[in-house]
Amino acid sequence: MKPIIKLRSFEIEDKVRLAQLANNKKIYDNVRDHFPFPYNESNAISFINRTLEENPKQTFGITYEGELCGGIGLILQTDVYRKTAEIGYWIGEPFWGKGITTKAVALITEYGFNELDLIRIYAGVFDFNKGSMKVLEKNGFIKEGVFKNAVIKNNGICDEHRYYKLKED
């Protein structure tokens, strides 16, 4: 029997578990700097409250067998890019290697195209995050290009690999 992986709204009751999972340097090393480290309950409460105000809904908790295990979201773009969103996601380390991220990316991509009426979803991946590249490729995202020396993370300079997927007509 396949494990059950779902997306759901974050709830204030998630604050302790969210802080436990997100307070991990290995996660921080692969996400944007606005994701705090160390990550505490206060960070979790602020984040959850922001997600609860979203309209339309763009950010979701990822559950594995009913247990919160990570987060995923679409950052809606504006102006001439208004039918485009950037995808971002992370999974707590105890849940790595279970195919959860691949399924979560499929679910939010479908949501973005069908519910938010997007025509394009893209992701920027640090050059050292090969796992994230594989997740995107398994979901039909295509590498669009490599932005050389585009990212500064942990005082180091790296390339960003840009992936995209278009809504199928």
Image (cartoon, rainbow, N blue to C red):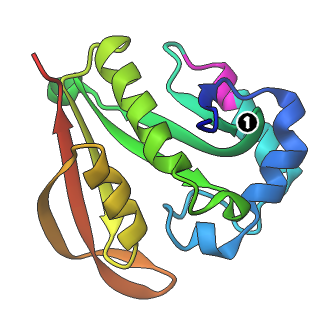
- To which quarter of the image does residue 12 belong? top right
Label 1 amino acid? Glu
x, y percent for residue 5: 60, 34
Horizontal relation, residue 62 to residue 68: left or right: left
Between 38 and 161, which is closer to the camera in this rendering? 161
Q: Circle 1 sits on which residue?
A: 65
Between 74 and 157, which is closer to the camera in this rendering? 74
Residue at the (66%, 30%) spot, across then down: 50
User: Magenta stretch?
Assistant: 50-54
What element does badge 1 sit on?
loop
- Number of labels in the image equals 1
x, y percent for residue 61: 65, 35
Picture layout, residue 99 above or below residue 79: below
Q: Main secondary structure of the magenta part?
A: helix
x, y percent for residue 8: 65, 24
Residue at the (40%, 20%) spot, across then down: 111
Quadrant including the C terminus: top left
Between 1 and 25, which is closer to the camera in this rendering? 1
Picture layout, residue 29 above or below residue 10: below
Quadrant including the N terminus: top right
Residue at the (19%, 45%) spot, across then down: 164
Q: Is residue 51 magenta?
A: yes
Residue count near mark 1 (Cα–Cα under 10 Å), binned few <14, some 14–19, many ≥20: few
Horizontal relation, residue 89 to residue 39: left or right: left
x, y percent for residue 29: 55, 74
Picture layout, residue 157 above or below residue 84: below
- To which quarter of the image does residue 14 belong? top right
Q: Is residue 31 magenta?
A: no
Picture layout, residue 15 above or below residue 34: above
Residue at the (38%, 11%) spot, across then down: 115
